[in-house]
Amino acid sequence: MIAFLKKYFAALYIPIVWTGLIAVLMFLPGSMLPNETGFKIPNLDKIVHAGLFGGFVFLWSLFLSKRTGRDRSLLWGFFLFYVVACLYGVGTELMQKCCIVGRDYDLADILADWAGAGLAYGLSNLLLLPQAR
């Protein structure tokens, strides 16, 4: 499974596109977001936040793991991606608060971003480090 991921998803353009997708979705005006009227899942937006920022960490870690085989470098890289994801999440929420019409700052979104990034950081360490040896 990891060999499949590295073969097809470890290209540089994939994490770059994912990072751009996060920016587009986080910076959409509130009027462009879908309105959940008939079918409502509680806290769906938190699951989306966790998935987006978890994907950010995992895809960048996957890219790095294909480029280097040294465990120490990978650990530092994975941690760096985790920190960048956390800062990116806070930054997008602050931008929503001050600059984007119809969007607001939500601490729970930041916590969901951090949780998703943390889970992906752990998965990266579990799944990608043994493959580097």
Image (cartoon, grey):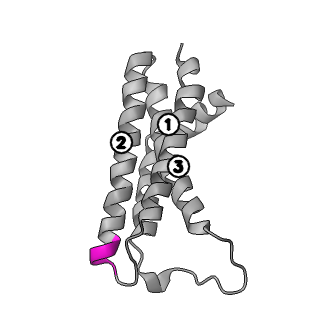
Element on which disc 3 rests: helix
Left or right: residue 81 versus residue 41 is left
Q: Is tag 2's residue or tag 1's residue first in the polypeptide sequence?
A: 2
Asked whether the residues under the numbered discs 2 and 3 touch, taking CB atoms below 8 Å apart as contact, a structural biologist would say no
Left or right: residue 103 versus residue 43 is left
- Looking at the image, the residue that sits furthest to the left is 98
Vertical arrangement, residue 42 with respect to residue 78, above or below = below
- Looking at the image, the residue that sits furthest to the right is 39
Q: Amino acid at mark 2?
A: Val
Residue ID at (35%, 72%): 96
Q: Which residue is mark 2?
A: 83
Q: Which residue is mark 3?
A: 116
Q: Which residue is mark 1?
A: 121
Element on which disc 2 rests: helix
Q: CA distance from mark 2 to mark 1?
A: 10 Å
Q: Nearer the viewer, residue 70 or 10?
A: 70
Q: Amino acid at mark 3?
A: Gly
Element on which disc 1 rests: helix
